[in-house]
Amino acid sequence: MTQIVNKYAKRIGLSIFKVTESVLNMSSTTSTGKSSDEISGYILCEKDELDLGITLKGGQSFRWVECSDGNSYRGVFNSALWTLSQSDNKLFYTRHGSKKGFQCDKALSNYFRLDVSLKENLKSWAGTDSHFKTTYDKIGAVRILNQDVVENLFSFICSSNNNITRISGMVDKLCRLFGEYICTVEGQDYYDFPKIEKLSSSELENILRKEGFGYRAGYIVKSAKKLLSLGEDWLLGLKKENGATYEHARESLMSLPGIGPKVADCICLMSLGHLESIPVDTHIFQVACSNYTPHLSKQKTVTPKIHQEVSSHLRELWGPLAGWAQAIVFCVKINSTSSKTSKKRPISKAEKKKSVKTKVGRKNSSD
């Protein structure tokens, strides 16, 4: 426990040994700060099967950032740092700071589920749903990521009553404070997601509360402790490939503190292989009320019962990969919402003059 507190203190700048500690754990670096432990290459992947930007920044994973060049993305998965970019038919990668013997092509194909044809499924969904047909043309090729279940689980515990920006900040803090160092690239240190053992510390709850996690801090620690008591194979046993049904996996996840129906469905969909799982948040509920379940439009909150009704309806409509279809609809919705809020009506010169006069008048009256 003392080690955890000391590590936390170091990473928030309370130790003069912070830089030394990072250097000792790094691979050899060049004068540019770029790690020499790198592998670069590409795999064949058409852009209409994968749009990096919307897939990586669409609320599935919270570890990816857009690079300054505006064309590439950098993030962590499989305990390595990756820089990704794409052309019309290639996915380019650079893997930084990972162990030897790592098969990059296989890792990327698995992470993006490239064994599944998105184009074929788009045809299928559009064929059974006229609303979906008019939706997917508005967005790029969204894929469901195949993520580490531990990282995915705790990331979505952080998502409660939160937005993507704040969730990303919380996940980043968890990694920087309690994760294992991976490498330094362009002056930036990168860390792996913490192990469950690190997150189970009682003292960690107070640290996270001070870091702005609020009530989520308690859920993180309590869920970590319960997962430890259940054993390391419990979560893996909930995967579809290991024989677990979607219903069993979902119900089991909801036995953990801080995990309700929506979070359980996110975990089932994005890290357990249950692609029929449909997380119903405010955005999906609004779409459902507009196009699929209008009788629910008077409901103001998504109760567990409503969540079940909406997800069951969409699952019957979209089929065994319904969760993937939902992700596309979700991305269209959040992008259209952000576009509306970002558009401001131009202010005329007359309005500007009127505004200035009003401010001056208020100032004079207060004097």
Image (cartoon, helix red, strand yellow):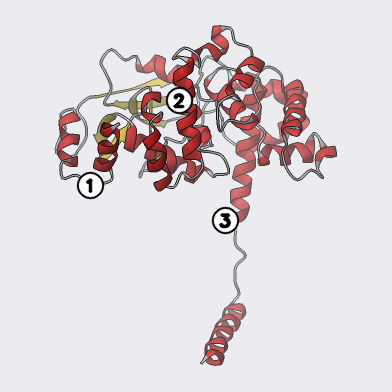
Q: Residue at x 53, y 92 (%)?
A: 364
Above or below for 240 versus 80 = above
Instruction: Point out which mark residue 342 bears.
Output: 3
Report crowding for label 1: few under 14, some 14 to 19, many 20 or more residues within 10 A (C-alpha). few
Instruction: Point out which mark residue 307 bears.
Output: none
Cβ atoms at labels 3 and 2 below 8 Å apart: no
Q: Please, what is the three-letter code of the amino acid marked with disc 1?
A: Leu
The first of marks 3 and 1 along the sequence is: 1
Q: Single out the mark in the foreground, 2 or 1.
A: 2
Cβ atoms at labels 2 and 1 below 8 Å apart: no
Q: Residue at x 76, y 21 (%)?
A: 316
Q: CA distance from mark 2 to mark 1?
A: 28 Å
**In the rendering, at what x and y percent does residue 131 appear?**
75, 34
Above or below for 79 versus 286 = above
Q: Observer-nearest residue: 318 or 24?
A: 24
The residue that label 2 is drawn on is: 225
**In the rendering, at what x and y percent does residue 5 appear?**
29, 37
